[in-house]
Amino acid sequence: MLIATAGTTSSGMIDPLHACAEIAEHERLWYHVDAAWGGGALASDRMRGLLSGIEHADSITIDAHKWLATTMGCAMFITTRGGVLSQAFHASTTFMPSSVAGIDPYLNSVQWSRRFLGLRLFLALGAAGWRGLGAHVERSIEVVERIKGLLLARGWQIVNESPLAVLNAVPPSALGDVRSLVRRVVASGRAWIAPAVFEGRDVVRVCATNGETTQRDVDELIAALHEPA
């Protein structure tokens, strides 16, 4: 198996998906793309090209609760090899109500008595459609770009070059160390950020996935980051 990542959770970095696909094909490997974070870009006509090469994957994972306007937890597993999926997860007993192994998800899941988590994504699609979800993705990228500009203007350093809605930023030394700064902001209740590590360096991770994030929220985050300890 060869696994590529389409949007790392901490930094939004994307592996060279076409090159990985060529290696997998040459070596006859199962090619899986972990698009848990970045997969939402597929909903946007403008951003979909960022994941070019993902169409060669044998399987893909996407977390809808990360960037497709659903709540925790709602994830997708997509594969072109449905028969293999059935072989891997098929289970049946005399007390189970169905025997249609090829199409019945009840017989092809690790979880038998489970909640219908996919309903959350179906509702988002029903309310907004792919066009609406695409606009949601594009807007979140614009929000992060706005935050990026404001931080750069205040002497911060941006260390990740990601086209997705996630930012890794290093504060000016006057603001103290990253983890203490993050604790202060989160404890204030004014905004949520997280510490992360990028290439061995502590960074402040900022992401935007909530469709109701406003300019006022952005301003509140910037103020909270620069409030004296």
Image (cartoon, grey):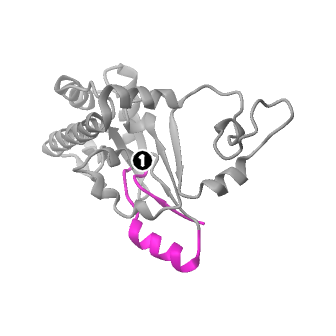
Q: Position of residue 71 (x, y in %)?
A: 45, 27
Q: For the residue labelled by badge 1, is the local secondary structure a helix, a strand or a loop?
A: loop
Tell me which amino acid carries mark 1.
Ser
Provide the residue span drawn in magenta. Answer: 1-29
Give the residue drawn at x 32%, y 29%: 210
Q: Nearer the viewer, residue 174 or 178?
A: 178
Residue 161 visible in image:
no
Identify the residue at the far front of this view.
100
Q: Could you tell me which quadrant the N terminus lies in?
A: bottom right
Q: Residue furthest bottom?
A: 26
Q: Quadrant of residue 82?
A: bottom right
**Residue 137 sits in quarter:** top left
Regarding residue 75, the answer to whether it shows in the image is yes
Figure check: 174 above or below 113:
below
The spot of residue 161 in percent (x, y) is: 28, 57
Q: Looking at the picture, how far across and down is residue 174, in whole percent?
A: 25, 40
Is residue 125 magenta-colored?
A: no
Question: Is residue 143 shown left or right of residue 53?
Answer: left
Residue indicated by mark 1: 10
Front residue of this view, candidates 79 and 201: 79
